Amino acid sequence: MQHFFGVLLVAVFVFYVVSAHGLCSLSKEGIILTYIIHLDITLDQYEVVSVDLGDTVVKVYHNRNIFPEHHKRGSIFFAHGNSASHKVWEHQLTDESFNRRFNLYAVDFPGHVCLLLFFREPFHF
Amino acid sequence: MYVSFSSSANHSISNLRSNKGASTFSTDPNYRYTAAGYAAFMGAVVQQLGITDCVFVGWSLGGHLMLESFQREEVFRQAAKAVVIHGTPPITTVSDILAGFIWTDPAQQYFSQAVVTEPEATVAVTAFFRPHIAEHPGPYAPIIAEWTQQFLATDGVARYIVNHNPFGDEVNTVESLLAQSSTPIAIFHGREDRLINATYIEGLVPHIPTLWESSIHYVESAGHAPFWERPGVYNELLDSFVDTVFDW
């Protein structure tokens, strides 16, 4: 019996710690375990490449300098939606697993200005 | 239909808004903000950055532009290992446009409006998420506020042209492209997407032979932006598809 309560206590503690870090959450469907979002990779680490099209200059963001020692298997290119920017892909662009294995690119379309001066706190569900 | 906007006026807005870290407004909006203009831009990006063996992932308008780029740009097709679209009903005709989107949602009107107020932009952005978020934004409030500012910072001319005259005088052939292509394609979709008619997309499934697992992959408890509402589930799904593609 003592062991049972001990294990239960440890389980509650682990759940609390993990949920506090945004790795799992309670929902209508029960406990949802989410992918680990490694906040140590940030969009600031992305190399910004300018592509001049004559009538407009677009910015492309590339993870060239993140895990440069890793052999990248291929590329994933993210294209945002209407009136948005590359920042909508934050959870994908900062994913450690993707960064280790792939060249990641994201773009701001012509006419779509990313608000780089807009800061906010890290966001968790 | 030809939409006339003053290049010089647009250019001055561009100078006002642009900075070192941001894409700029186009001085040739009547071309650049059409499907052909965006596709040419994607072709140039792929070429200049030397992108190869790539899975192109497009959300909503981005999904349409990935399909248009695939259709129009040889350099894009050469680089494309696969294409992923979500929140994107592939469209060819005007009737497709009517069927593919949920036009009864009040937010739809703002996605093609050149000038929007902040409350209108907020309504539009809130529609990216599940329906109940409009009533109870809760933890979504900060991201809605940020994306609203992003919406307002976008060139309204781009919003207007790409939604009113995306194809110019050309005939769009996306559906036949999907039917004939040998490139793998995946379609993801937020189960509670307010803006896109999933039934319409379901109707296209039998006509896309290279569709991953011959089905749409739904993300539960997510609206139009599943990559943000359910990043763990979404990343896992994308990871599975990408793994499949590189072993294809």
Image (cartoon, coloured by chain):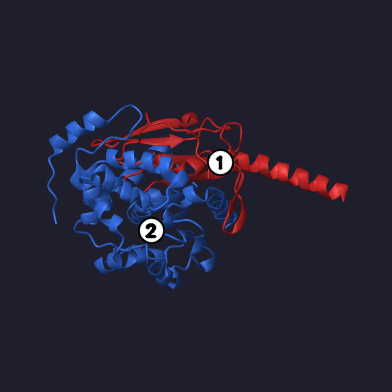
Answer with left or right where residue A10 lies relative to residue A96: right
Could you tell me which residue is drawn at 35 percent across and 33 percent down? A115
CA–CA distance between discs 2 and 1?
Answer: 24 Å
Give the x, y percent position of residue B1: 14, 57
Mark 2 is surrounded, within 10 Å at the Cα level, by few (under 14), some (14 to 19) or many (20 or more) other residues, namely: many
Q: Mark 2 lies on which chain?
A: B
Q: Residue B74 carries which label?
A: none
Give the x, y percent position of residue B56: 45, 50
On screen, B180 above or below B77?
below
Q: Mark 2 points at which residue?
A: B88
Q: How many labels does the image show?
A: 2
Q: Residue furthest top?
A: B20
Could you tell me which residue is drawn at 17 percent across and 37 percent down? B10
The front one of B29 and A54 is B29
Tell me the amino acid under the disc marked 1. Asp
Q: Which chain carries label 1?
A: A
Mark 1 is surrounded, within 10 Å at the Cα level, by few (under 14), some (14 to 19) or many (20 or more) other residues, namely: many
Res. B140 in view: yes
Q: Name the residue under label 1.
A: A95
Q: Chain coloured blue: which letter? A: B
Res. A77 in view: no
Badge 2 vs badge 1, beta-carbon distance below 8 Å = no
On screen, B87 above or below A40?
below
Answer with left or right where residue A75 lies relative to residue A18: left
Tell me the amino acid under the disc marked 2. Thr
- Tell me the SS state at disc 2: loop
- Tell me the SS state at disc 1: loop
Give the x, y percent position of residue B226: 47, 53
Identify the colour of chain A in the image. Answer: red
Answer with left or right where residue A47 lies relative to residue B122: right
Are the residues flagged by discs 2 and 1 from a single subunit? no
Q: Quadrant of residue B8?
A: top left
